[in-house]
Image: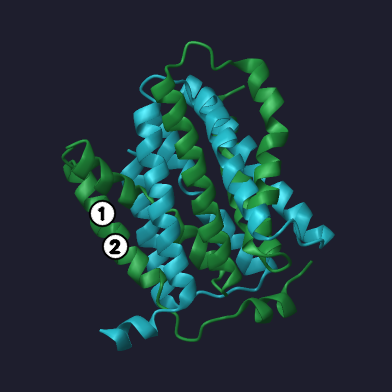
């Protein structure tokens, strides 16, 4: 058992932790969405993220990394996610979620393509198959 | 504007975001990324507030939304830590996008929702896909990627 555990790379544990936290976020969003509109939820999510960010800042004793490019990517990541979400909500106003959500769920394909072209990342055959199955799963969950 | 354009914008921005996440964690720590990403969200806050308000929402809904935001922030930290520890963006992003698997499990346990036939297929695909995506024959490190990264 412990040998099996040691074989799992550390990044995989973090990925599983992320799936848990985001899964819980999806669950809570489901409860909140019964009474609040998507934009109200988005505002609450942003406000809810602040204590976590402040906690991280305190943990780092205020010593933030100063790499300008790193900071730019961080800010762009937040803005891109937020604007993308607003685009998703705008699409939902004119089309059913059963059409929009499976379609927007294919966004990892673009990340994989960009990582292939710009970061020169290469997936092995097993991972390629896994990506296709994961995309099928994402679409299936959102129908 | 046609809905497909809005959906396309979402795909484009979320897809490019995966790249920003990897490039960011190549340069700053996962905790720093959480702080800057949150700042990015805050930039959009006044604009969103112009379009709606939180008036009329019950305390319960406000609390659920805020806790969901905090949990989302922890998820962000975990994905940044995952990328920081050497995961490829092309593995980490599709893998963590499988989070609805956990949502379905939680809804089954706590809301007593029964997964539909389609959701069972999704669960099977997600488990198989997740396991296959995690299969690394020779793990790439962040340092290796930094060397080959076009910036």
Which residue does the image show at 72% across and 35% down from the upper left? B43
Name the residue: 56% across, 43% down: B11
B124 sits to left or right of A77: left
Residue B48: % across, % down: 64, 24
Q: Report whether mark 1 lies on the same chain as mark 2.
A: yes
Tell whether A99 sits left or right of B142: left
Q: Nearer the viewer, residue A124 or B95?
A: B95
Please identify the quarter of the rendering in which residue A103 is found: top left
**Residue extending farthest top:** B56
The local crowd at label 2, few if under 14, some if 14 to 19, many if 20 or more residues have their Cα within 10 Å, is some
Q: Kindly identify which chain the residue marked by label 1 belongs to.
A: B
User: Residues under labels 1 and 2: Cα distance?
Assistant: 6 Å
Classify B40 as above or below B55: below
Q: Residue at x 69, y 32 (%)?
A: B44
Task: Indicate which disc residue A69 carries.
Answer: none
Q: Quadrant of residue B27?
A: bottom right
Q: Residues within 10 Å of mark 1 (few under 14, many from 20)?
A: many
Q: Secondary structure at mark 2?
A: helix
Identify the residue under disc 2: B127
- From this viewpoint, is residue A48 visible? yes
What secondary structure is marked by label 1? helix
User: Is the C-beta separation of discs 1 and 2 under 8 Å?
Assistant: yes
Residue under circle 1? B123
- Chain B drawing hue: green
In the depicted structure, whether residue A139 falls above or below residue B141? above
Chain under disc 2: B
Q: Considering depth in this image, is A56 or B79 the residue closer to the camera?
A: A56
Q: Position of residue B8 (x, y in %)?
A: 58, 38
Q: Is residue A30 above or below residue B47?
A: below
Chain A visual colour: cyan
Residue at the image point whose x is 45% and y is 45% from the top: A105
């Amino acid at each position: 058992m412990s040998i099996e555990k040691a074989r799992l790379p550390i990044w995989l544990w973090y990925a599983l932790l992320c799936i848990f936290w985001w899964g819980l976020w999806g669950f809570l969003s489901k409860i909140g969405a019964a009474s609040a509109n998507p934009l109200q939820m988005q505002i609450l999510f942003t406000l809810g993220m602040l204590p976590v960010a402040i906690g991280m800042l305190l943990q780092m004793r205020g010593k933030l990394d100063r790499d300008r490019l790193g900071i730019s990517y961080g800010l762009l990541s937040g803005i891109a996610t937020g604007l993308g979400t607003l685009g998703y909500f705008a699409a939902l106003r004119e089309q059913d979620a059963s059409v929009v959500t499976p379609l927007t769920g294919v966004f990892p394909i673009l990340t994989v393509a960009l990582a292939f072209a710009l970061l020169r990342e290469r997936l092995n055959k097993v991972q390629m198959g896994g990506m296709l199955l994961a995309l099928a799963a994402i679409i299936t969950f959102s129908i | 504007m046609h809905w497909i354009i809005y959906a396309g914008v979402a795909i484009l921005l979320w897809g490019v975001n995966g790249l920003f996440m990897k490039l960011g964690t190549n340069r700053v720590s996962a905790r720093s990324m959480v702080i800057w990403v949150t700042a990015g969200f805050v930039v959009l806050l006044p604009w969103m507030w112009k379009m709606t308000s939180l008036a009329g929402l019950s305390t319960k809904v406000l609390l659920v939304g805020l806790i969901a935001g905090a949990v989302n922030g922890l998820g962000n930290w975990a994905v940044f830590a995952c990328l920081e520890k050497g995961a490829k963006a092309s593995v980490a992003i599709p893998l963590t996008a499988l989070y609805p698997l956990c949502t379905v499990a939680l809804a089954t346990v706590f809301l007593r929702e029964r997964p539909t036939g389609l959701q069972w297929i999704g669960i099977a695909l997600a488990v198989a896909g997740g396991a296959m995506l995690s299969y690394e024959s020779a793990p790439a490190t962040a340092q290796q990627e930094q060397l080959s990264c076009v910036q």
